[in-house]
Amino acid sequence: MKYLLHGLTLLLFQVSFSQKDTIIDFGEKLINENRLTEAISYYNKSLIQSKNDEQQIYLLLGLAEAYKLKLDYDEASVYFLKSYDLIKQTKNPQLEFLYRVKMAEFFRKRTLFLDANEQLIKAEKLLKLHPIDDTNLANFYSRKAALFTEYFFKVDSTFFYANKALELSKKVGDKQGYFYASLEISGVYEEKKEYDKAVEFLEELLDYAKENRLIQEQADAYINYTRVLFKSNQFEKGLKECEEALDFAKINDLFYGEILFTDNIRNFYDKLGNIDKAYEYLEIRLKLTDKYYQIEHGKFLFELEEKYKLTEKENQIKINNLKIVNQNKALASNKIKLYVSLVFILIATVLVFFIAHVLKRTKINNRKLELLSQENEFLLSEANHRINNNLQLVIILIADQLKKSIGSENFQLKNILTKVETISTLHKHLYRNKDKKIIDASKYLSDVKVSFFDTFNDNNIHISFKVAPVDIPSDFAMYLGLLLTELFINSIKHAFVKQDFKEITFDLYEKDNILYFNYSDNGDAILNAKIKPKLIDKLCRQLKIKYHIETENGFSFSFIKPISND
């Protein structure tokens, strides 16, 4: 009886799903073809005319997806939350499952892997209690495969879940699901360095995306395809494909992709020994980055000017209203009080001119202050852009030198590169934050960890990384990031000798305004040795902390520190 009820529930949902009519299908088609502005307009109009709660939920999720692809994560979050409020009212497990899977992808896209995994765990609980539509289930397995690739680093699990997603996508004819499941499988071959198989998979996926007008998917395939060609030393072919991908990004208004493919072309020219062309594309990339910032800045100035014009009109209306009031008073006066009224009119007129003069002076002063404010904001924005571009240029130059170096010099340059990237990451977080004094330790230190992914993989080091969302002062954050970077470098360089299993564990959390920092590795190179790393000691002095080091079971470093953001 239980299975019969489950089957009936799934059948009813599939009927309902099929009746979401062409409204939802057309919106999804616009997103697949990267017509994101049209999609947003279409979804907003359709929301006004939505027939039922289920259709409204799909429309809200579509809006969130469109804003996510435009990289407007704040607006995407708004529509995800609106859809979830409505899902809670309907108590529909199918729609909640769909929401959880989409949120997992939303967090994964932003490299918030712990949050993404939490959403998939919640989806899995629903799966145990309710029958789930095959299309949603395929998407769930596909996102699970992606997380095993990017966060857990278990290619066998990736392959297992990607194949499950692929079979279900074939069954229901889900083109998008088929594409991303296949993309994850190509990633497995890439991770295993079976580049020929990966290239074969990706070339088929490119053809598939072109045939089905999957614009976003075609861009994703190009990204992976050119990366694999680079890794497999097919530089001539990679350059040609990357130039084709750049034209594709320009035609389809994929501005972020245009920046990415421009940078990839620079890397190919660098490998082919054409330094002039490499620097030519580096300059193009920097100009594209500046253009992106100028677009954002132009929007800000336009909005500011419109606000000023509105205030100016309101002041003029107030002056005109005051004149009308005085004129009405004059007309209401009788002949006996004519002369007295004339005196009052004269006084009122003088008062009006005085007020007008004061308002004019105030308007001029306000305009000057606004112009100064705009100028200061522009200069600050420009300074931030230049700092970011210069930091990126330093990183690129060090990376170029790194490719030419060998032995100890290579490792020293890697050390310098990771520290510069740590400072660059802090700058990006400060630039994005409204409050420049506070940094989210979870987002910042997660980005620091990301810069070590390739090094960890190359050295077969497993990383267990848990950082709670703790707000810390920005000056403290810089030294904290450098400290974590130095600990990573020391473990990679000194901790492990001939070990099959290498592990680094890092845990950071806050309790009762006390920050707890715990770092360790299982290296056996310095067991029971008394050590005091010089640079780490200097950084701890800057942080004004007392730290504790143990070497009985590998290397362990920890400290606690009261924190306050007041």
Image: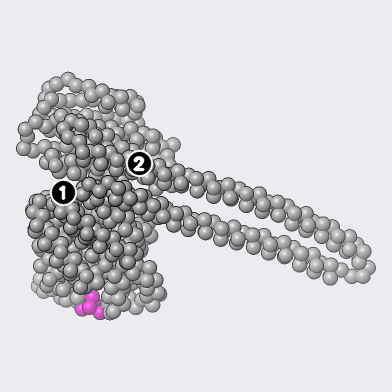
Residue interval drawn in magenta = 15-19
Q: Which residue is mark 1?
A: 152
The C terminus is located in which quarter?
A: top left
Task: Residue 390: name its quadrant.
Answer: top left
Q: Is residue 251 visible?
A: yes
Q: Judge left or right: residue 236 versus residue 289.
A: left
Nearer to us of marks 1 and 2 is 2
Q: Residue placed at 12% from the left, 62% from the top?
A: 201
Task: Residue 464: name its quadrant.
Answer: top left
Mark positioned earlier in the residue sequence (1 or 2):
1
Examine the rendered structure and indicate whether residue 17 appears above or below residue 450. below
Examine the rendered structure and indicate whether residue 27 appears above or below residue 383. below
**Residue 148 coordinates in the image, percent (x, y):** 15, 52
Q: Few, some or many C-alpha atoms within 10 Å of disc 1 (few <14, some 14-19, many ≥20)?
A: some
Q: For numbered disc 2, what is the local secondary structure?
A: helix
Q: Residue placed at 41% from the left, 44% from the top?
A: 386
- What is the three-letter code of the residue carrying label 2? Leu
Q: Residue placed at 18% from the left, 58% from the top?
A: 237
**Residue 295 coordinates in the image, percent (x, y):** 44, 57
**Residue 351 coordinates in the image, percent (x, y):** 79, 56
Q: Which residue is mark 2?
A: 391
Q: Judge left or right: residue 162 versus residue 335.
A: left
Between 410 and 172, the one lying in front of the other is 410
The N terminus is located in which quarter?
A: bottom left
Mark carried by residue 52: none
Q: Residue placed at 80% from the left, 69% from the top?
A: 328
Is residue 414 highlighted in magenta? no
